[in-house]
Structures are given as structure tokens and as C-alpha cells.
Image (cartoon, rainbow, N blue to C red):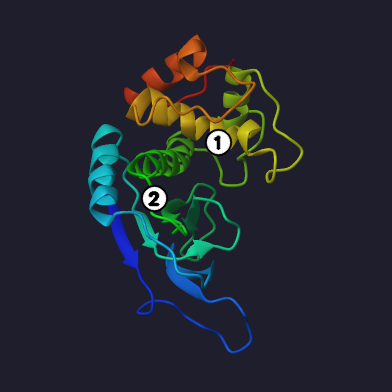
Amino acid sequence: MSIKVLSFTTPENLCWSFDALEPYFRVPSGSYTRSVKVDSFPAYAHDLALVESEARRVDALFPITQEVSLCVIDREFLDRTNGWCNVDYLWEGREISIPDFKATIVLSGKRIPIHPAMTRYLVAHEYGHAVRAFISRERKEPSDALYKPESLYGEYQRLRGMEQPKHYGGGTWHSSVEELFANDFRILVLEAEREFWPHPGFARPEECPAVVDFWRNAREGKFQGSNV
């Protein structure tokens, strides 16, 4: 399995700097680590056994060759989101246009215990972002071409008949191609928490033949653009 589940707990793994008010965890980030600032207020982590079982499930349904670190922390992100996935390219000091990568997923703790459905949704959704990086690399797309018309996201916007909002953040999460891509993957490929569709104004993926075809092809290892 390419997914490694890691647990970060307080006080064992929580770090405090002399010059900052917020504590942080250090999680894997490519060949290095990165800081994840958190609220020190007591919180509950996702159930580790459930995270591990869902990691095995999604890896079996759509395996990728790159390493994914799935980090479970017991404090809440300062930005109050539920989780995120970061892709770190492995340049290794060489000038290459299509580098390999490692992905890091971090699941935020919450102030009250987390419903198992949230865990199942979040593992599948965040893994979808790692899958995006995998498909982009299989299509031999340069790392700086993420939103260009000929890129995977450019094609996906056309499949969805949408335009990317002017910024990604508060109030625009639901209309961003990154999130539609990950949730279409979650529903059509992983069949995880299918009833949850957090994209008002956008048709569900089952109602979009071009999107259904895209993911059927992806499951068969056909990743090249469709010239939509």
C-alpha cells in the first residue's frame, strides 16, 4: 500500500516556539517536513483504525505509485477546515519538467468527536487530490501547467462547463475545480458517502455523461485529454 497512516498526538508531538503564540505539528512534506499550526484547545482526532481501513480501501480501488502520508492530528487547524492534501515535487537538484512527487494528507482534529461518515468522506476526498497529481504526471504535464487550458484541470473545467472562481477560499470552495474533481472521484470511483454533495449549483457527477466517461477511462488507465 502506498498510503502510510501517521498519528500525531499531544503532548508527544506538539511543538511550541518561543516567538509564536500557536503550537504546531511537523508533518512529512516531500523530502522534508512542514509546520501545521493548530489551536491548543483540546480536540478529538479521527478514529485511527477507521482511517487505516479507509486508506486500505481507497488504495485498493485506485492505487497510485507515489507515496502518500496520511497524518491524523489531535488538535484543530487554525484555518478551521477539515483537512488538506499537499503535493510536494521531488526535484532532487535536477532540471526536469515532469518531476515525481509525494503527497501529504492531514486530517484536522475537532472540538467534539468526529462522526465516522466524516472520516470516510474526508479520506476519500483528500486522496482525490493526490490522484489528480498522479493523473497529471501520467499525462506528462509540467508541474507549472496546473490551470492551463490544455491541463487536466483545464479539461475538467470544460467537462463540467464551468469557470474557476477568481480566488480559492472563503465562499468559493464549492465552485473550485479542485474540489469538484476530488468529489466526483470520491463518488464515481470510491463510492464513499455518496449522499453528500457539497456543491450547490453544480450537477452531481452521475448526471454528467462526460464526467462519468472520464472516470471510467481513468479506472482503465486512460488518462490522455479528450479535446473537449
Q: Left or right? Give the position of 34 relative to 188.
A: right
Q: Is 131 in front, or is 138? A: 131
Position of the C terminus, as image quadrant, is: top right
Q: Is residue 106 above or below residue 187?
A: below
The residue carrying mark 2 is: 114
Q: Judging from the image, what secondary structure is the residue with disc 2 in?
A: loop
Q: Label 1 amino acid?
A: Glu
The residue carrying mark 1 is: 179
How many dots with numbers? Answer: 2
Q: Is 178 in front, or is 39? A: 39
Q: Label 2 amino acid?
A: Ile
Regarding residue 55, the answer to whether it shows in the image is: yes
Residue 90 lies, in percent from the top left, at: 46, 59
Q: Residue furthest front?
A: 112
Mark 1 vs mark 2, CA separation in Å: 21 Å
Q: Is residue 190 above or below residue 11?
A: above
Regarding residue 218, the answer to whether it shows in the image is: no
- Going from N to C along the chain, the mark reached first, 1 or 2, is 2
Which of discs 1 and 2 lies nearer the camera? The answer is 2
Answer with the quarter of the image where residue 37 lies. Answer: bottom right
Residue 148 lies, in percent from the top left, at: 66, 34
- For the point 33% across and 25% down, the residue is 219
